[in-house]
Each structure stands twice: as C-alpha cells, then as structure tokens.
Image: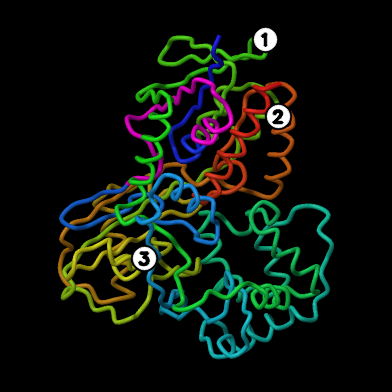
Amino acid sequence: MMTKVAVIGAGITGLSAAYYLQQQSDAQIDIIEQSDRPGGKIKTYQRDGYTIELGPESYLARKTIMTELADELGMKDDLVTNNTGQSYIYARNQLFPMPGGSIMGIPTELKPFIKTGLLSPAGKLRAGMDYFIKPKKMTTDVSVGAFFRRRLGNEALENLIEPLLSGIYGADIDKLSLKSTFPNFKEQEEKHGSLIKGMRIQKSSAPKPAGTPKGQFRQFRHGLQSFIDKLAETVAENGAVIRYNSAVTAVESRNNKYALTINGEQQHYDGVIIAVPHTVFSKWFEDAPLRYFRHMGATSVATVVMAFDEDQVNNEENGTGFVIARNSDTVITACTWTDKKWPHAAPPGKVLLRAYVGRPGDDVVKNNSDEELVALARHDLDKMMELKGAPEFTIVTRLMESMPQYEVGHIDRVRAVQQYMKAQYPGLLLTGASFEAVGLPDCVKQGKEAAVALAADLNK
C-alpha cells in the first residue's frame, strides 16, 4: 500500500516541505489548506502597472536557499534585487540617515557614528563604553533589550537598534529572546570582548561583492505570489494533491499513524507535517509540553498602501524608506518608499508608499476600520514628507496574530517540544514561523528540514 503523507498548510513552509519531500520519498502527498489559495501571508496584488505586496515584501539575499529553490523552479531570470539607497530612522520628530557601516544599528565605522544626529554626545560616549565592558557568560536566555542596553546604553537601543529589530519581529524588544533571534551578537561579543569590535571584524572578513553594489533584498518581477504559484504548480505536477477550503479540526495518533479530521471527515495518514501558525495547531493537542503554544503571543499588524501621482509627493530623499523609534508619537512603525526600492512595483510617474501599523500590546489594528487606519497612517506620513491631495487608491491589509512572539526562553521550549514530539509522535513534524525564524528563506529551510526528517521516519 502506498505511503500517504499530509502537509497541513499551503503557505511557503508547507509548500516547501512538500517539494523537498517529493525529492526524498515516493509517498502520496495531500496538502491541506483551509483557505481558497496558496501562499498564506504572501499575497501580490496587480493592477494598472502596479505590483503590490500585501504581505511580506521581499527576502534577504544572503539567505540563499530561497534563491536556489527559485533557480530549481526555473525562475532565476524573474529575480530582481532592490535598488540601493539610504535608509532612515524617524526619531525626535525628524528623519535621520542610518549611519553608514552599521549592522542592525550596531556601529562598525567611527566617522558616520560620530556624525549622526540620532544620538547625543553622551549617548555616543555611552555606546563607546562597549569596548570596556567585559562580557558576561550567558548561562540563560536574556532579552535583546537587556543585552543591548548593557552593551551600548539606552539611547543607542531606543534610537538605533530597537526600530530595526522590533520591525523584523513585531516584538517588544525587552521581551524578545536574544538566543532565539540574534545569538550571533552574543557570540561575537564573547569572542572579541566587545560587540562593536566583533561586528567590525565580522564585517571586514565578509566577502566583498564585485562591481556595482547590490541591494540586500530579492523579489520577483511579477511579485512573490508568482513564486508561490510556481511552487504549488510544481508540487501538483509531481503528484501532490492540494485540497483548498479544507479545515483540519483534529489530529489523533493511532498506532504511529494519524487520523486527521478534515471538514468533519476522518482521513488517515502515515506521516504528517504541520506548517500552520501556533495559534491554529495549538488547539489540536492537549499534551502538557505543547501548552506553551497556547500562551505564546502573536502581534497583529497591518499594511497601508497608498498610490499617488509623483507631483503629489515631495520626497527628495534618495532612500528606500524608514523605521520609527518607539518613543515617537506615531501609529505607524515604518514606511517603505516602494517605487524607489522596487522600480517594477509602480508605473512611471507614480509613487507607491507602504506604511506599517501595529505594535505588541496595542489594539490599533483590531479597533480601527480600514478608513481610520488610512487616516492614521496619512496623519503620520504628513509629518515626514509633503503629500498633496488624496491618493489614487489605498489598500489596507490586516494580518491578525501574524507575528509570533519569541519571548525569553522560547528556543529552549521549542527544543523541548521537538524532543517530545519525536518520542511521542513519530512521523509527525511541527514546523514554520512559530518555531525558529520568521523570514521567507527561514521558512523554506524549516520546510526542507521537516521533509528530510519525515522521510527518514518513513524509511525506517
């Protein structure tokens, strides 16, 4: 009898898991998706020459697994790299250029750091004390905020580092786990006796790209959805069945096999990969080690897209956008000057702005209508650039409970859950952004790792 596998979730993690499992096994794969489309949070909207991302916008080029997968899918020629340009931080009611040479806000070059107006002279002096503060051995996890506050001081944390790092994770930096997110910072600090020194050495030893400087991010000329569609098409052509509008409500273990309740009917599988958010799968398990996921937070965010004619916008900055210090009086947390960062995203003569709304602990996304979110975002953007008249159109996209919160101790709890699942649920893998990383290449990597592990279980 043919081995049957269920992959729950047709987002990027689930589709990647199915793709790599097909390379490892000849099992029949059913991909079970609650919605009517693949991609999860990834969604591209196209109209009148615009290519607009409503969810994730791009991925880090240095994480090469997604580029390699695109190449395997025959999409190498569709990849585009972002235009390089200055990025900014909004603090103390004005835009400041990101200091040159900084890595996630950590200074590695003296001159740009000395010249920046983001920090006071006292703040710069306090950050420089990093060279003289001896590292503490990290025996337990600590928050990102506590680590950077000790190394560089509160001003550098608030105005340089927090806007960048919290933007990635939608998190409270004083709860965000260092061990789960940026353990490399701690490793560099301990290895070199100073965080700044460690990052400077790491930067100087990194290979330098030849020729014209390239951007850090990658996209597809027809949007991220084109990648998802091609991935879904490929796994289907290779024999997988994608079942849309199919809701899983229960997962039961039966003699090392699994019974899934899908749209009220039970289906039986030899192996299962669960690649949906923890807010979904935590309802399926009563086991004590998995109860962590019932209490694990998730921040709700929204994007507000505005399109203008270029004569409506006075923005002479040659940049890609800005992030906002959390002590600023704004609802938005960041803004991308999308047409400058991605010229393919807007037709000539048009300006495309994408503002981000939603912080941990606030209910602004939940409590405001689309029209109100647009008005709030416009009110904030008017502080940072000159906008005239109404936009050509606006799009509000809500991503409710979409940003998993990796609070202190997260990765240790994840490791304990993974060990428990391996012992108690052989042939069932939990994976995705709720576990180890939220970036798109990280999700591809986790999907691949789950596929390899399940193939090994099936072949025993």
Q: Nearer the viewer, mark 2 or mark 1?
A: 1
Tag shown at residue 289? 2
Front residue of 58/232: it is 232
Q: Is residue 305 left or right of residue 242?
A: left
- State which region is magenta: 17-43
State the residue at coordinates (31%, 69%): 381
Residue 19 is one of the magenta-drawn residues? yes
Total residue callouts: 3
Q: Is residue 320 magenta?
A: no
Q: Which residue is mark 3?
A: 336
For the residues marked 3 and 1, what is the alpha-carbon distance in whole angstroms?
51 Å
Badge 2 or badge 1: first in the primary sequence = 1
Mark 3 and mark 1 lie on one chain; the one further toward the N terminus is 1
Percent of width and height locating residue 119: 56, 83
Foreground tag (3 vs 1): 1
Return the x and y of residue 70 as percentages of the image width and height: 44, 49
Question: Who is closer to the viewer here, 70 or 102?
Answer: 70
Residue 313, compared with residue 241, is above or below; it is below
Q: Residues within 10 Å of mark 1 (few under 14, many from 20)?
A: few
